[in-house]
Image (cartoon, grey):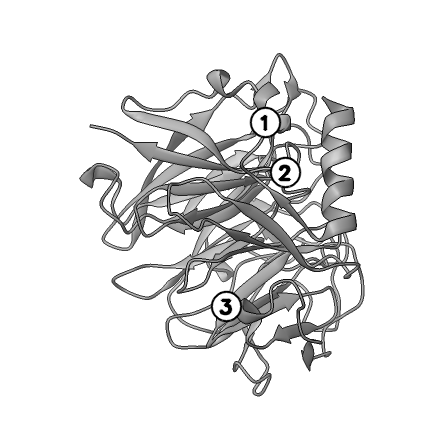
């Protein structure tokens, strides 16, 4: 399996594209191990997509995918709209952790560690992409938590997080541990939220247009502390506690002295400890049953240093009256006997109502659908 996967990855590197219609490494992925609620099923949307991370869909139906370690950005095309991609095209390569991708007015936006790039009219040049325009180079260069998830808000601002350059620390530079935003042309860069250790996923409620985001908790406080967080930011200027307070009531043993957790905006709900909650997405279509509509799915990448691994799944947070009421598993099975064969990263709801899930370990994008 490893040799086949490496061969396909080399094909992408040499040719810039690979067909998704033939034999590929996903034939050996144990999809039967994924447990879903009754009526749901999972299949492969695209493979191979080496190190598949954040996703964005253009209005014309092209799926763009960022990466972290691969340094590439892909365009994925499903020409016949059959729920399975036909081709994966490499539109950018050798970038500095291009995790984040966004799309606006015909242009692809890509986030590197220290700058935002814009590829104009990208869909007419998938196999001969233009030179990118550097919109902003005003971000720190530290690679620790330096990769970025980016997305355009309903009001047209581009939101860009800047992670803490450490496990836990305090920095004078206010850009660290924040969510920033700017106009689509790079103007008016400003801080929207503070005290955010490392968010790699956010979305806006389809009715209230208010921001919801995940945040990864610090390490080395034990297996069960602190929790990861799902946060709600209905307005700018809020502080979510890092590095002074974790979760709702847990002061940091080093930086929490003299501070009270009541000073900060608490999480909407505490998630599992060290689950590495990344991508989040409100379900807004009609394929899934009504009970899922306008609730929040979360991709949990999985713990890296917990003695008993946790995460490696997709969970669901149910919301009501601007509050998160519950948090439970929706899809699991990528973790088997303490070993993971896949790691969910990002989520995306397609126009037909299916939900895509990227996986940077198995190098694929899954499609979760529902049949009555």
Q: Which image quadrant is residue 312 in?
A: top right
Q: Nearer the viewer, mark 3 or mark 1?
A: 1
Decide which of 287, 91 is in the foreground and name it.
91
Q: Position of residue 155 (x, y in %)?
A: 38, 76
Residue drawn at point x = 62 percent, y = 75 percent:
118
* Crowd around label 3: few <14 · some 14–19 · many ≥20 (10 Å): many
Please tell me whether mark 2 sits on a helix, a strand or a loop: loop
For marks 3 and 2, the one nearer the N-term is 2
Label 3 to label 1, Cα distance in Å? Answer: 28 Å
Residue indicated by mark 3: 103
Residue drawn at point x = 77 percent, y = 33 percent:
6
Residue indicated by mark 2: 48
Q: Nearer the viewer, mark 3 or mark 2?
A: 2
Q: Is residue 211 left or right of residue 259?
A: left
Q: Position of residue 221 (x, y in %)?
A: 69, 36
Quarter of the image with the C terminus in it: top left
Decide which of 147, 108 is in the foreground and name it.
108
For marks 2 and 1, the one nearer the N-term is 1
Where residue 26 is drawn, which disc sits there?
Answer: 1
Residue drawn at point x = 60 percent, y = 48 percent:
88
């Amino acid at each position: 399996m490893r040799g086949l996967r490496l061969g396909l990855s080399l094909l992408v590197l040499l040719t810039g594209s690979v067909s998704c219609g033939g034999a590929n490494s996903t034939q050996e992925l144990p999809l039967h191990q994924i447990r879903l609620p009754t009526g749901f099923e999972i299949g492969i949307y695209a493979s191979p997509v080496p190190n598949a991370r954040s996703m964005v869909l253009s209005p014309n139906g092209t799926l763009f995918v960022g990466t972290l370690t691969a340094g590439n950005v892909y365009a994925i095309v499903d020409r016949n709209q059959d729920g399975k991609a036909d081709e994966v095209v490499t539109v950018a390569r050798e970038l500095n952790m291009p995790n984040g991708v966004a799309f606006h007015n015909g242009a692809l936006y890509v986030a590197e560690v220290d700058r935002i790039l814009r590829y104009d009219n990208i869909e007419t040049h998938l196999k001969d992409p233009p030179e990118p325009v550097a919109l902003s180079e005003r971000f720190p260069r530290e690679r620790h938590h330096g990769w970025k998830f980016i997305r355009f808000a309903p009001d047209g601002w581009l939101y860009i997080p800047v992670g803490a350059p450490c496990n836990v620390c305090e920095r004078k530079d206010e850009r660290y541990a924040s969510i920033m935003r700017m106009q689509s042309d790079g103007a008016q860069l400003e801080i929207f939220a503070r005290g955010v250790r490392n968010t790699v996923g956010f979305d806006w409620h389809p009715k209230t247009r208010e921001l919801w985001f995940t945040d990864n908790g610090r390490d080395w406080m034990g297996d069960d502390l602190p929790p990861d967080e799902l946060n709600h930011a209905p307005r700018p200027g809020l502080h979510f506690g890092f590095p002074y307070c974790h979760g709702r009531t847990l002061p940091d043993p080093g930086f929490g002295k003299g501070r009270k957790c009541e000073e900060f905006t608490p999480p909407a709900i505490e998630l599992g400890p060290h689950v590495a909650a990344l991508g989040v997405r409100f379900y807004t279509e009609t394929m899934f049953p009504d009970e899922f509509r306008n609730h929040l799915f979360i991709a949990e990448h999985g713990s890296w240093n917990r003695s008993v691994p946790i995460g490696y799944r997709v969970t669901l947070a149910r919301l009501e009256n601007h509050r998160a009421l519950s948090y439970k598993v929706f899809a699991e099975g990528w973790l088997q006997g303490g070993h993971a064969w896949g790691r969910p990263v990002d989520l995306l709801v397609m126009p037909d109502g299916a939900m895509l899930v990227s996986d940077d370990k198995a190098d694929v994008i899954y499609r979760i659908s529902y049949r009555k």
